[in-house]
Amino acid sequence: MDLIDWSAGKWTTPPIATRNDGPDLLVEAAEGSDAWRVTSYGFVHDTEHALLAPLAQGRAVEVTFVAAFEAQFDQAGLFLRAAEDVWLKAGVEWADGTPQVGAVLTNPVSDWSVAPVPSWLGRAVTVRASRDGDAVTVRARVDDDPWRLVRVAPFPPEADVAAGPYCCAPTRAGLTVRFTRWAMGPADASLHG
């Protein structure tokens, strides 16, 4: 994997503030920031803070961040965008009192899948998305634990896609996320290890 410099990306929605802390990037999310389209809630939010760079077919993106969350729907991870209404976000989100690993696929409305990961709180989480053909395969892990499959999702093979770290704070002010790594490289060789 080749490390991507934080300056290589472009924000979908600029955050309140960013600053470098050594090699890390600290991002302060705006209160009310989120990414969601229609399903169940009826609203559209396109205010996520996603720092994106091109992701070609046959490539993978990885983002590492510290999952230090405490308020409903605090979230961080990686974001893949093909269009305003075609995107995927995957990572860790604080929901119903615990951290949850999951993903939202939007095309053109959103869905959501999560699984509780209480032991991941406050630890370094890496989320990986491999783009291959008509699919994106999302995996995640904490520290150096084995990869865990999060999602295999359909994604338009011909689209120009951009990808990178993202965070949101739908319910509060003051969320600052520490991102420690952003890298791209070859897509996974197969769906199963």
Image (cartoon, rainbow, N blue to C red):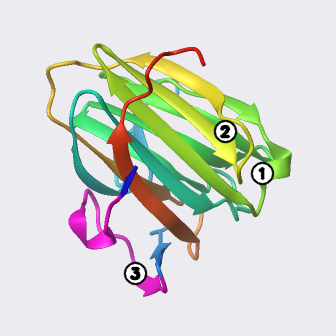
Residue that badge 2 annotates: 101
Mark found first going from the N terminus, 1 or 2: 2
Q: Taking 176 as reference, is 76 above or below it? A: above
Residue 67 part of the magenta-drawn span: no
Q: Where does the image place residue 100, in percent across and percent down from the top left?
A: 71, 41
Please say if the residues under marks 1 and 2 sit with CB atoms less than 8 Å apart.
yes
Q: Eyeballing the image, is 37 above or below 55?
A: above
In the rendered image, which residue does mark 1 sit on? Answer: 120
Which residue occupies 78% across, 51% down?
Answer: 120
Q: Which mark is residue 175?
A: none
Task: Give the left or right position of residue 18, taking residue 63 as reference.
Answer: left
Q: Is residue 170 left or right of residue 16?
A: right
- On the question of residue 174 being in view, the answer is yes
Dot 1: few (<14), some (14–19), or many (≥20) neighbours within 10 Å?
A: many
> In front of the other: label 3 or label 2?
2
The label shown at residue 17 is: 3
- Circle 2 SS class: strand
Q: Which residues are magenta?
A: 3-22
Tag nearer the camera, 1 or 3: 1
- Lower position in the chain sequence, tag 3 or tag 2: 3
Tell me if 193 is positioned left or right of 33 in this view.
right
Residue 65 placement (x, y as % from top left): 57, 61
Q: Per the image, is 12 magenta?
A: yes
